[in-house]
Image (spheres, rainbow, N blue to C red):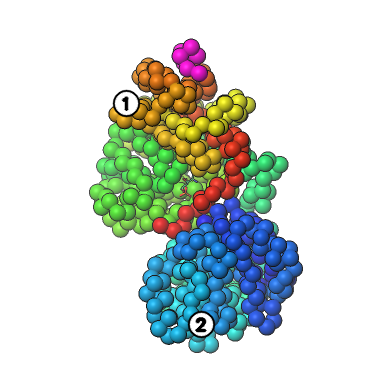
Amino acid sequence: MCGIIGYVGAQQASPILLNGLSKLEYRGYDSAGIAVYDGQALNVKKAKGRLKNLIDITKNGSEPTGTIGIGHTRWSTHGRPSDINSHPQTSGTGNVAVVHNGIIENYMELKEFLISTGVKFISETDTEVVAHLFEYYYDGDLLSTMQKVMERVDGSYALGILCKYHPDTIIAVRKESPLIIGLGNGENFIASDVAGILNYTRDIYYIDDKEIAIVKSGSVEIFDMYSRKIEKEIFHVDWDIEAAEKGGYEHFMFKEIMEQPKAVLNAISPRIKDGRISLDISLSPDELRGFDKLYIVGCGSAYHVGMVAKYIYEDMLRIPTVVQLASEFRYSNPIIDKRTLVIVISQSGETADSLAALREAKRLGATIVSIVNVVGSSIAKESDHVLYTWAGPEIAVATTKAYSTQLACIYMFALFMADSLGKISEEEYIAFIHALLKLPEDLKTVLELKEVTQKLASYYFNAKHIFFIGRNIDYAISLEGSLKLKEISYTASEAYAAGELKHGTISLIEEGSPVVALMTTEKLFDKMLSNIKEVKARGASVIAVTLDNARDISDEVDHVIKIPYIHPMMEASLAIVPLQFFSYYVASMRGCDIDKPRNLAKSVTVE
Ligand code: AGP
């Protein structure tokens, strides 16, 4: 979603802002802008469309001149993408400029109030009210003005504000939307995401909800709503900027698919010691015995990981496990209490719906374990226990390595619980550990399927509609394969539990309809074959994904993709890889913007 950057120091701000915005492009956006104080006025440049348009109108960052500024990439919520609706938004006098991530929920009421005082609005955005309110409440002191504004606005926000009356200061504040301060030498930064400032500094402060940062070139002061000063610890970012670069690959998505063996190794190897799972989670066997229900929440692919987890946890632990979309959870009056363990899964750790679900579950008394990639993110901070996926930065909008490392964490947590609760025999435990240790190597083997899947993509990239079917864990994989294809190649696709087809969806199958059939659940192989016959009888072209030790079915289907046998509960990790490649190549052949698909954002920080 939207990205924020800000700079104050001795260098020209515009090139630094543009560079920062280029590193935030991956989040998804439809317009971009900057405001720089040039010694006399706040000079605003903004443009609809790709960052290139802003680079053009700023003559490659050579104007506006000035050493303090803020910048933004906007992903529209209120008001269509346009030059006027782009940020920064300014007050009527042009003396206050604001960049904003999030949604001001009561903006209509504030707008009416401001109009009644004579303010004229020029954009359709919710953000513009913040600029006008700031000007309205301005009392000569940035901190107290900001507090007054915050008392009036409801919703979620990360804000970067420049005020002409204080030309050496950026004000930064957040509520339910991420914001960090980058600490430099004689210069400081604000950003919505570490990637935006990593070219300049690795030392950062994480700003918490309702904290206000007063950022100057030589100082950063942080206050709460009552003007009490807050001391922050400096967090040192240890990943390299190269990790957030393409490293010779054409797309981040491809790079991230190829990084999966290493990412999964990073997630697993420090957590297996002397053949036993050792998690950085302090839940005792007694505490674990106290849970009579598991709830798993997440959005999109994280939810699909939860679907895989449900099959594993119910089978292995015999504990009822509910998987729910985070956006549904918060309004479903969930049956949760202190005997419920809630697992929140999120790559970014900032997804608004997942964060809201976490808070609701906590309020109801549940214990929260989160599986998160971004260190220090809101979900990680607000959970009782965190399992970091350690996948490194994931830039492509379509998740691949984060999905795989989330699965790895799900397996390890299953084993940790099963062992603590005495629900697994030593023999089964050893077999599972063995499979976990083997997983990175097996992932390398499935990466070799890229040519095969590229060829398949060349047969089907023009298909209007592609179906994915499977049963049990294979159904969960189907959902993820179908989502990957939809989001990056814009191909209409549906994933169905194979046994459910004949209850309606099979009417969509016609001559030549491509159907990807997942057949890695050994016990359901024959059932799947029956479903394949049903669609074949109606003219479908079937691509089957089977285990390499499975019965040969090449006479029954059009194409077979074989993946190594690993462990009945862990096949999702291998089966998803050819589907990732397939989506990637279909999207590439259809000429899509693979890393930044239309209308999508990497981190969905609004409801
Ligand atoms: C997956 O490819 C998606 N882009 C999307 O579904 C994503 O998984 C979802 O938005 C959840 O994001 P999170 O993991 O950062 O919470």
The kind of secondary structure the magenta stretch mainly shows is: loop
How far is disc 1 from disc 2 in space, using C-alphas? 62 Å
- Could you tell me the amino acid type at mark 2? Glu
Can residue 529 be seen at all in this image of the molecule?
A: no
Dot 2 lies on which element?
helix
Which residue is located at x 27 percent, y 47 percent? Answer: 339
**Residue underneath mark 2:** 135
| Residue 224 inside the magenta-drawn segment | no
Q: Is mark 2 within 8 Å of ligand 1?
A: no
Above or below, 116 against 487 in this view is below
Image disc number at residue 277: none
| Residue 555 inside the magenta-drawn segment | yes
Which residue is located at x 48 percent, y 76 percent? Answer: 121
Residue 321: horizontal and vertical position, in percent? 31, 39
Above or below, 239 against 459 in this view is below
Dot 1 lies on which element?
helix
Q: How many marks?
A: 2
Residue 336: horizontal and vertical position, in percent? 26, 50
Give the image quarter of residue 195. Answer: bottom right
Residue 337: horizontal and vertical position, in percent? 26, 51
**Residue underneath mark 1:** 502
Mark 2 residue crowding within 10 angstroms, few (<14) / some (14–19) / many (20+): many
Above or below, 591 against 455 in this view is below
Can residue 242 be seen at all in this image of the molecule?
A: yes
The segment highlighted magenta reads 550-558
State which quarter of the image contains the C terminus.
bottom left
- Could you tell me the amino acid type at mark 1? Lys
Q: Nearer the viewer, residue 599 or 527?
A: 599
Q: Is residue 415 left or right of residue 267?
A: left
